[in-house]
Image (cartoon, rainbow, N blue to C red):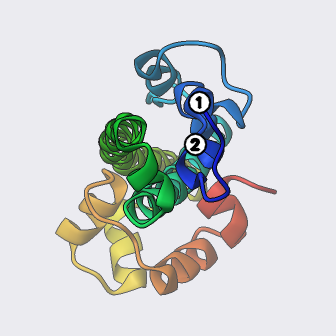
């Protein structure tokens, strides 16, 4: 096929780049299908908070890359319709446009899937933090010898509210955590994240 000075579509189109999934490859993930990679990034209740946050970071980076890549494809599609190559080689241009559209649809599907994965991961992490905090709250309350009722009186909250805090059914506000840590004679860091 003869070359043209304005053969933008042919020059810039890189089918191999699309097929090799650069949005996954750059994160040194295993060579596997998209579904297998997505599965490897899923978190479980048994995962440590550190491992959960590491996976979440990777998910966020992949999502950013997918969005950028989706925009990249869109820009190329817009330019394809205006370049001289489209008029000179309409059949070849159409073939490239079809492949770009396929890549755009594929990327859009992945953005949706990764967004769902991001949302579910965030929920698991929040639950993990809440569960761990609840366990520490119960432990330090018992260790301090303060009853559930007494703690409620100190914090000036009703028994049902204290019960929900202790059972992880309600998130404790920061100002209440500070007062709780003081009442239980434990540092705020130790109560919140378990650090000494």
102, 47: nearer the viewer: 102
| Residue sitting farthest toward the left | 160
Q: Quadrant of residue 81?
A: bottom left
Q: Is residue 41 above or below residue 166?
A: above
- Determine the secondary structure under disc 2: helix
Q: Is residue 93 left or right of residue 57?
A: left
Residue lying at 38% horizontally and 72% vertically, measured from the top left: 150
Cα separation between marks 2 and 1: 10 Å
Please give the residue where the numbered disc 1 appears in the rendered image.
1
Please give the residue where the numbered disc 2 appears in the rendered image.
10
Q: Residues within 10 Å of mark 2 (few under 14, many from 20)?
A: some
Q: Is residue 97 left or right of residue 52?
A: left
Query: Which circle marks residue 41 in the picture?
Result: none
Q: Is residue 187 above or below residue 63?
A: below
Upstream in the sequence, badge 2 or badge 1? 1
Q: Is residue 58 visible?
A: no
Q: Quadrant location of the N terminus?
A: top right
Residue lying at 70% horizontally and 60% vertically, measured from the top left: 190
Asked if the residue at tag 1 contacts the one at tag 2, i.e. Cβ–Cβ closer than 8 Å, the answer is: yes
């Amino acid at each position: 096929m003869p070359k043209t000075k304005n053969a933008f579509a042919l020059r810039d189109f890189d089918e191999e780049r699309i097929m090799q999934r650069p949005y996954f490859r750059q994160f040194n993930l295993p060579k596997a299908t998209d579904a297998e990679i997505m599965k490897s990034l899923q978190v479980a209740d048994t995962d440590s908070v550190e491992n959960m946050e590491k996976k979440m970071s990777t998910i966020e980076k992949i999502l950013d890359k997918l969005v950028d890549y989706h925009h990249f494809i869109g820009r190329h599609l817009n330019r394809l319709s205006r370049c001289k190559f489209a008029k000179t080689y309409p059949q070849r241009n159409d073939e490239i446009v079809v492949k770009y559209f396929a890549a755009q649809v594929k990327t859009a599907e992945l953005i949706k899937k990764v967004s769902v994965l991001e949302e579910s991961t965030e929920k698991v992490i929040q639950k993990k933090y809440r569960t761990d905090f609840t366990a520490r709250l119960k432990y330090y309350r018992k260790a301090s010898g303060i009853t559930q009722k007494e703690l409620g009186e100190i914090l000036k909250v009703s028994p049902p509210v204290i019960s929900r805090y202790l059972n992880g059914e309600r998130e404790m506000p920061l100002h209440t955590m500070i007062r709780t840590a003081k009442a239980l004679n434990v540092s705020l860091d130790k109560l919140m994240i378990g650090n000494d």
